[in-house]
Image (tube, rainbow, N blue to C red):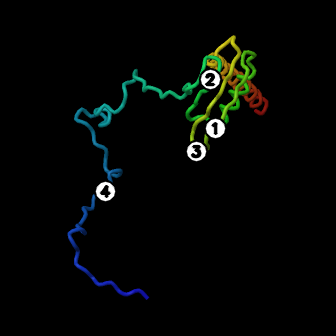
Amino acid sequence: MPGATKARAPSVEDAEMEDAAPTSAQPPTDTQDGGDAMEADGEYPELGEEEEEEQRVRLLPGSTSTAASFEFLEEGHTLGNALRFIIMKNPDVEFCAYAIPHPSENKMNLRIQTYDTTTATAALDKGLQDLEDLCDVVSEEFWTQRESFMATKS
């Protein structure tokens, strides 16, 4: 059975804390002109101003004009397999494959080898455009069929 603890006098380390409401429960403060405090500090960008988008694709070292490896950040099997399939439909492409280097890394590597008639970068650009066009066609057909189904259901 545990022993009883002795009562001790409060030390300097056990100083009294003020009973104040947490900052999330306190009312927001306004600036002198009545606007939002964060806007006055300049933390919101101007309406016409855009933030710089992080580069999500890069050419890996050791690439040549007809054989190149690309690294896609924050992409996985969904884009990798679809892009590989579309790029391999290009008759100027000799080889295309993708790999996820490690499951804990949010990266996807894509290797493209072309014949001398085009470059790997041009094949990637064409593949991305063709994939976007394919997605647009599928999306448009889906919404058309959905609308016709909903019309017959009503």
The C terminus: image quadrant: top right
Look at mark 3 in the image and give the residue it sits on. 104
Q: Which of marks 3 and 4 is in front?
A: 3
Report the residue at 63% width, 36% height from top. Answer: 76
Q: SS at mark 3?
A: loop
Mark closest to the chain's N terminus, 4 or 2:
4
Give the crowd class for mark 3: few <14, some 14-19, many >=20 residues within 10 Å: few
Real-space Cα separation, disc 3 to disc 2, in angstroms: 24 Å
For label 1, the crowd category at 10 Å Cα-Cα, with few meaning under 14, some 14 to 19 and many 20 or more, is some
Image quarter of residue 109? top right
Q: Which of marks 3 and 2 is nearer the N terminus?
A: 2
Label number found at residue 21: 4
Residue depicted at 70% across the width and 32% down the height: 81
Mark 2, other Cα within 10 Å: few <14 / some 14–19 / many ≥20: many
Residue identifier under label 2: 68
Instruction: Give the residue displayed 56% in from the left and 27% down from the top.
Output: 60
In the rendered structure, which disc, 2 or 1, sits on the residue that comes first in sequence? Answer: 2
Q: Distance between the residues labelled 4 and 2?
A: 59 Å
On residue 100, the disc is: 1
Q: Considering only vertical position in the picture, is 3 above or below 87? A: below
Q: How far apart in space, not on screen, are marks 2 and 1 (Cα)?
A: 16 Å
Residue type of the residue flagged with mark 4: Ala
Amino acid on which the number 1 mark rests in the picture: Ile
Residue sitting farthest toward the top = 117
Question: Which of the numbered marks, if any, corresponds to residue 153?
Answer: none
- Indicate which label's residue lies in the foreground, 1 or 4: 1
Residues 137 and 84: in front is 84
Q: Do the residues labelled 3 and 4 touch (CB within 8 Å)?
A: no
What is the three-letter code of the residue carrying label 3?
Ser
At label 2, the amino acid type is Ala
Q: Pick whichever of labels 1 and 4 is earlier in the sequence.
A: 4
